[in-house]
Amino acid sequence: MLSPLYKLFGFILSWLYYVIGNYGLVIIFFTLALNALLIPMRLKAQRSTIRQQFLQPAMNDIRRHYAKDPQKQQQVLTQFMKDNGVSMGSGCLTSLIPLIIIWPIWRIIRAPLQYVGQVSVENITKIAEFLAGKGLLSEAAIKTAAQNDLPIINTLTNNASALAESVNQGWLRPDQLVNTSFLGMDLGRVPSYNPADWFGPNWRIELPLLILPLLTIITMILNMRFARLNVLRPAPSKAEIERAKNNPAKAGQATVDPSEKTMKYMQWFMPILMIFTVFTMPSAMGLYWVMSNVIFILQSVISYQMYIKPARVLLAGGAEADEPAPQSATKEDKETGKGSKSKKRGKGR
């Protein structure tokens, strides 16, 4: 089902690599461009979510009014949200898009020779069999060559004679061999989570690879903190929900929006996914997560300035309007004032 995305992303990355010539910069530019294209849709969904939070009191009134008729309650809520331009599934959709996009990213990062270098699977298999025959590659690597060609890239990069023979056989061109080195890091290597590897004999290779996992965690924390800026109305606590259930007068007033639940789960699921993948996937995955988090932080700032601040101003104005306006004198005060004035006049006379 995702094969068209594999081909499309692979074609774009291949063209970028031909133009830029640096694998790390290609990943950065592709990530920024891809997420920048999605920002308008995400902002639209954010606006719908904020509008839904803004209308939450009115929606709670509907829930309370139709508390004994759930079917009617849902119908009225749906129509009310439709009339006010609020989409129930917008937040869920934008949360699921990163999960859909991530599959082609994973596939391409594990097979840059196929997708970025545009070497056919048939030729990759021939190269793998040739290298295995020379004792330079394991038999297991042949079976997974179509999904993971990084061992082939590493072997050809470190063995000039094997590369020359592969070129002479017509299996690939020299410019198709992707150079995964970037700022002293090999983006084709998987970072180790074992401290013994960080400070072992290969520390010059292993230690720099920790930079991207650390940056991923830092930007992830910042992303979650900035995302909290875009909450217009805090979700009711469990205690408030329980009190509302026990108090018929507050029935339906304290309810959790289903989209908020989905977004809350995604806020925890995505960080776990990031931490897992940065230590099980090539380092290029960490570079992708870092740049994605930077874009999400920027999106949160834009959303806050465009929607949250004006909405809070409106809410503050509405709260002031709901309060009784200060008056110089009430009816009783006026009558009292008149009486005191007449008394003074009488005394004067």
Image (cartoon, rainbow, N blue to C red):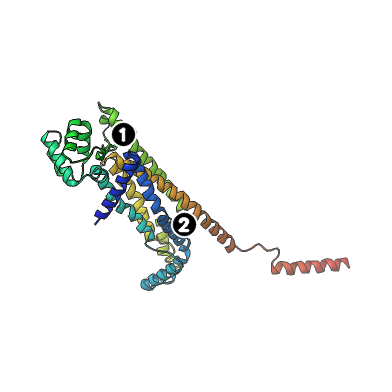
Percent position of residue 185, x then y: 31, 34
Location of the N terminus by quadrant is: bottom left
The label shown at residue 128 is none
The label shown at residue 233 is 2
Return the residue nearer the eye: 287 or 164.
Answer: 164
Amino acid under label 1?
Answer: Met
As drawn, 66 above or below 303:
below
Q: Residue at x 46, y 67 (%)?
A: 84
Return the residue nearer the eye: 258 or 279.
Answer: 279
The residue lying furthest to the right in this view is 349
Side of 89 where 334 appears, left or right: right
Amino acid under label 2?
Answer: Arg
Percent position of residue 70, x then y: 37, 71
Percent position of residue 333, x then y: 72, 66
The reply to whether residue 71 is visible in this rendering is yes
The residue lying furthest to the left in this view is 133
Proximity of marks 2 and 1: CB atoms separated by less than 8 Å? no
Disc 1 on helix, strand or loop? strand
- Circle 1 residue: 185
Side of 97 where 145 appears, left or right: left
Bin the neighbour count of mark 1 within 10 Å (Cα to Cα): few under 14, some 14-19, many 20 and up.
Answer: many
The reply to whether residue 144 is visible in this rendering is no
Q: Quadrant of residue 123?
A: top left
Give the mark, 2 or 1, whose residue is nearer the N terminus. Answer: 1
Location of the C terminus by quadrant is: bottom right
